[in-house]
Image (cartoon, rainbow, N blue to C red):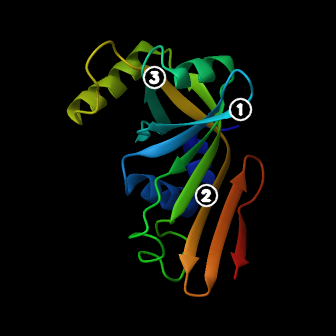
Amino acid sequence: MVAWDAFAAAEPAFAASVMAAFGADRHALLATLRCDGAPRISGVEPVFHASDLWLFVMPGSVKSADLRRDPRCALHSATSERRCGRHNPTGAAGAAADDAKVSGRAVAVTDPAAAAGFLELLRGRAALPPGPGPELLRLDIAEVATVCATERGAVVRSWRAGEPLRVRHRS
């Protein structure tokens, strides 16, 4: 697994496409594993900050408990029908994807300076809910995938740590 900056250095155009997909809507879906092994889907607001992909979750929430027990997770960008295929009709490599997925492990942020910088960013965006401060996590990345709807089908790009970018065309 790698940090976001290592992935972005290896595949800059692909990373830009993923960031644009997540940036198109501030909300995303996080898949975690419940204690019985069943999947759980929760809403989150991922943030790209200081060369990492960050998440903040409410302390004591079920997604927090899930990630403490088993840090494996998958993050999926919000998909909008109004957006699908319209901003990237040819499936160009650097344009925003219709769907983006990042899988890996959520890691608690324990560095006080890094946490303070991220909390300051959240306060500036008015993204902090009232109450106790959030739990701060960053994603160590195992796999990234995007799907772009095109005029001739779909372009699926996928990357795994230690492997080259794969591009498949589906019709």
Tag 2: amino acid: Glu
Q: Position of residue 91 (x, y in %)?
A: 55, 77
Looking at the rendered structure, the kind of residue marked 1 is: Ala
How far is mark 3 from mark 1, CA to CA? 24 Å
Residue at position x 46%, y 38% in the image: 43
Please name the residue that numbered disc 2 is placed on. Answer: 11
**Residue at (64% x, 57% y) in the render:** 145
Q: Are marks 3 and 1 in contact (CB under 8 Å)?
A: no
Q: Which residue is mark 3?
A: 136
> Disc 3 vs disc 2: Cβ atoms closer than 8 Å?
no
- Mark 1 nearby-residue class (10 Å; few <14, some 14–19, many ≥20): few
Q: Amino acid at mark 3?
A: Leu
Left or right: 86 as drawn, with respect to 103: left
- The quarter of the rendered structure image containing the N terminus is top right
Among the two numbered marks 1 and 2 on one chain, the one whose residue lies closer to the N terminus: 2
Looking at the image, which residue is at 48% across and 14% down? 60
* Residue nearest the observer in this picture, 167 or 170: 170
Q: Secondary structure at mark 1?
A: loop
Quarter the C terminus occupies: bottom right
Residue 52 image point, x, y percent: 50, 37
Judging by the rendered image, the residue that carries numbered circle 1 is 38
Q: Return the x and y of residue 126 as percentages of the image width and height.
A: 22, 33
Residue 135: x, y in percent?
45, 19
